[in-house]
Amino acid sequence: MKKSLTTFLSLLFVFVLLLTACSPAATADTGGTIAISGAFALYPMMTRWAEEYTALHPEVKFDVSAGGAGKGMTDALSGAVEIGMVSRTITAEEESKGAFWVPVVIDAVFPTISDKNPVRDQLMAQGLTQEVFAKLFISGEIKTWGEVIGDPAITDEVHVYTRSDACGAADTWAKYLGGAQEDLLGIGVGSDPALLDAVIKDPLGIGYNNLNYAFDITTGVNVTGSLVVPIDLNENGVADADEVLQSTSEAVQAVAEGKYPSPPARALNLVTYGKPEGIVQDFIIWILTDGQQFIQESGYISLTSDQLDAALEKVK
């Protein structure tokens, strides 16, 4: 009797396993909740995508939170969320741990200062070269705003701000300057909004922010109290008209036309643990197709058609 009961329970266990394995993955029609975390850079766009997708599929709910690209990657690989938002290059080590990723949109990082900076007029007229930024953020050779603009009479100290969390903005800005995030000098601040707030409150401060934090999402111009410093790309000592970016539309156009360097322009990625299935796969495919219509009005730049095709082929 005991042997028969054991055999029955064993067969029942196998049957349940088979039934579970054969059950279809949840789809947009059957509903479910998609948890998403990660890069501040992608957060505004993701919340818009979630709203639009839910309008089409009310059965699907979203839990979207920002916390930096490092958190997005960690959460995705650990299974804490279905999708991680990662605003930097995915490493081979992360792929070996199961990270499956596709790019979905393009964004950029911009240097920012307070509009009360004592040399703001000179900065906006001259711009700063990549070399000067590197001497501020990487080597620390430049210490004063007088050194920045070439006026030794000005001795105000430069206060450099950076991100304290593992994030794509810092990684991308550091790459532009020839380093890595751990090479960046400055006072560490824990988020994109907090970094801009610190710079706004400090007339001697300089930092960097993602596009939709450097510019106000609502007004489309510089966030009140801040300015985006022109990058003197041709190093002629003058901030040319196409180097001065004072609105979201100007920044988007500069990135889209390749006039703004890459890095600090870069693709933003979605990461899952292994190839996505069910509603997660459906949602990502929608982002790469119908969801692209919301990109420009949200202050982002679309991938090229070839990039979109490659991403779609990868995720299907």
Image (cartoon, rainbow, N blue to C red):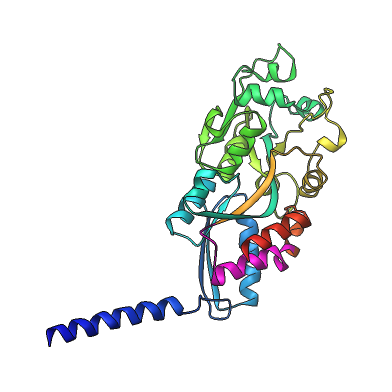
Q: Residue at x 62, y 23 (%)?
A: 158
Q: Residue at x 57, y 39 (%)?
A: 195
The reply to whether residue 207 is in sight is: no
State the count of labels: 0
* Residue 34 horizontal side relative to residue 156, left or right: left
> Quick one: quadrant of the N terminus?
bottom left
* Nearest the eye: 246 or 97: 97
* Nearest the eye: 34 or 192: 34
Can you give x and y, in whole percent of width and height, for residue 156 in the image?
Answer: 64, 19
Can you give x and y, in whole percent of width and height, for residue 19 in the image?
Answer: 40, 81
Q: Main structural element of the magenta stretch: helix, strand or loop?
A: helix
> Quick one: quadrant of the C terminus?
bottom right
* Nearest the eye: 213 or 70: 70
Q: Residue at x 79, y 28 (%)?
A: 232
Q: Please state the extent of the stretch shown in magenta in the rendering.
A: 272-292
The answer to whether 248 is drawn above or below residue 278 in the figure is above
Would you identify the image quadrant in which residue 6 lies? bottom left
Would you identify the image quadrant in which residue 92 lies? top right
The answer to whether 268 is drawn above or below residue 156 in the figure is below
* Residue 80 horizontal side relative to residue 107, left or right: left
The answer to whether 134 is drawn above or below residue 5 in the figure is above
